[in-house]
Image: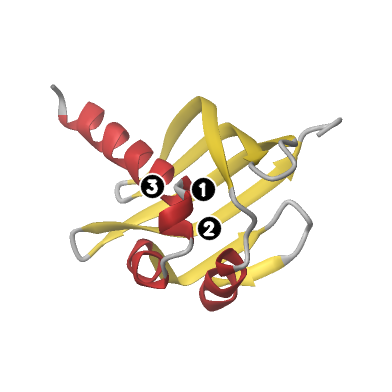
Amino acid sequence: MTTEFSMNEHLRSLEEKLLNPEVRKSPQELLYLLSDEFIEIGSSGTIYNKHQIIETLKQESEGYITIMNFKELQLAPEVILLTYTANSVNKISNNTRHSLRSSIWRKSDDRWQLVFHQGTPLAGS
């Protein structure tokens, strides 16, 4: 196993962790995974900072998110861009939404934290 493979798998696992409903509702987990400078541009166009997204995710409807077309691009030695397609299923209504997602992860103090995330709805979703 190469170091690059390990890093890519590690970042994918962190991204998938943030899609886990239990983690999304856990302020402690989110405080650890999100950088203090975190910014999100949501699929609605709303811009959130770290504390706003933590409060917003507490209110999120039950459901699950799967990903496909996962790609990574190194922007700098300790900065990685992840892109993928997300399929979000609402457990109550059973509606599915599809979106393009991008995340920027930065390594500092020997851990990776999310500094930026954007979700863009796909047409017809």
Mark 2 residue crowding within 10 angstroms, few (<14) / some (14–19) / many (20+): many
Q: Farthest residue toward the right? A: 124
Quadrant the N terminus occupies: top left
Q: Which residue is mark 1?
A: 103
- Looking at marks 1 and 3 on the same chain, the residue that comes earlier in the sequence is marked by 3
Which residue corresponds to the image point at 69% horizontal and 45% vertical from the top-left? 92
The amino acid pointed to by label 1 is Ser
Q: Secondary structure at mark 1?
A: strand
The residues tagged by marks 1 and 3 sit, at their Cα atoms, a distance apart of 13 Å
The amino acid pointed to by label 2 is Phe
Quadrant the C terminus occupies: top right
Q: Report whether 109 appears left or right of 54.
A: left
Mark 1 residue crowding within 10 angstroms, few (<14) / some (14–19) / many (20+): some
Q: Secondary structure at mark 3?
A: helix
- Looking at marks 3 and 2 on the same chain, the residue that comes earlier in the sequence is marked by 3
Picture disc at residue 53: none
